[in-house]
Image (spheres, rainbow, N blue to C red):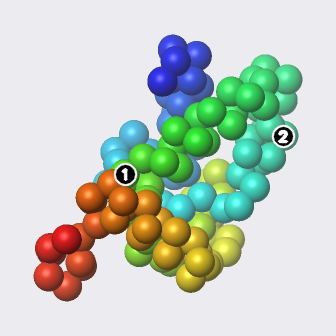
Amino acid sequence: MSSKTQRLLILLQERFPAAFPADHKHIRPLKIGIDQDLKAVLGDGVDAKSISRVIGYHTHRLSYLRALSRGGQRIDLHGNAVETVTHKARQLALEKLKAMGKWKNPQTGKQ
């Protein structure tokens, strides 16, 4: 991750700790289109490419994929539940985890 992306992630963790928690154990699926919300809130101070990079980094993290695979609710910037994770999104996350060799059966704890 570039230093610019890292600085933006730190800024998001400070301004929106519910959506971008520093502790990976608290990561929850983000609402679809949260990048547009960030563009609106951050304005011209941050370019769209940087936002896309940090969202891409965040959503491809192991902890994010695990949260997505569990389903539940997607959240907005303030941690409010706004939509349900679809079955398709859960399945895609599970496929990515399996491809990484990081999927574990929640009932047995084994791959």
Image quarter for residue 52? top right
Relative to 89, does residue 44 appear above or below in the rendering?
A: above
Q: Residue at x 33, y 54 (%)?
A: 100
Instruction: Report helix, strand or loop for mark 1.
Output: helix
Residue 64 visible: yes
Q: Position of residue 91 (x, y in %)?
A: 49, 75
Amino acid type at circle 1 is Leu
- Left or right, 104 with respect to 22, comes to left
Q: Which residue is label 2 attached to?
A: 40
Image quarter for residue 47? top right
Using the image as rendered, state which of residue 26 and residue 52 is in the foreground: 52
- Left or right, 106 with respect to 83, comes to left
Q: Residue at x 36, y 59 (%)?
A: 99
Relative to 45, does residue 80 appear above or below in the rendering?
A: below
Image quarter for residue 70? bottom left
Of the image marks 2 and 1, the number of the one nearer the N terminus: 2
Disc 2 residue crowd, few under 14, some 14–19, many 20+, Cα 10 Å: few
Q: Residue at x 68, y 27 (%)?
A: 50
Disc 1 residue crowd, few under 14, some 14–19, many 20+, Cα 10 Å: some
On residue 62, which mark appears? Answer: 1
Residue 12 visible: no
Q: Position of residue 66 (x, y in %)?
A: 38, 63
Amino acid type at circle 2 is Ala
Using the image as rendered, state which of residue 95 and residue 12 is in the foreground: 95
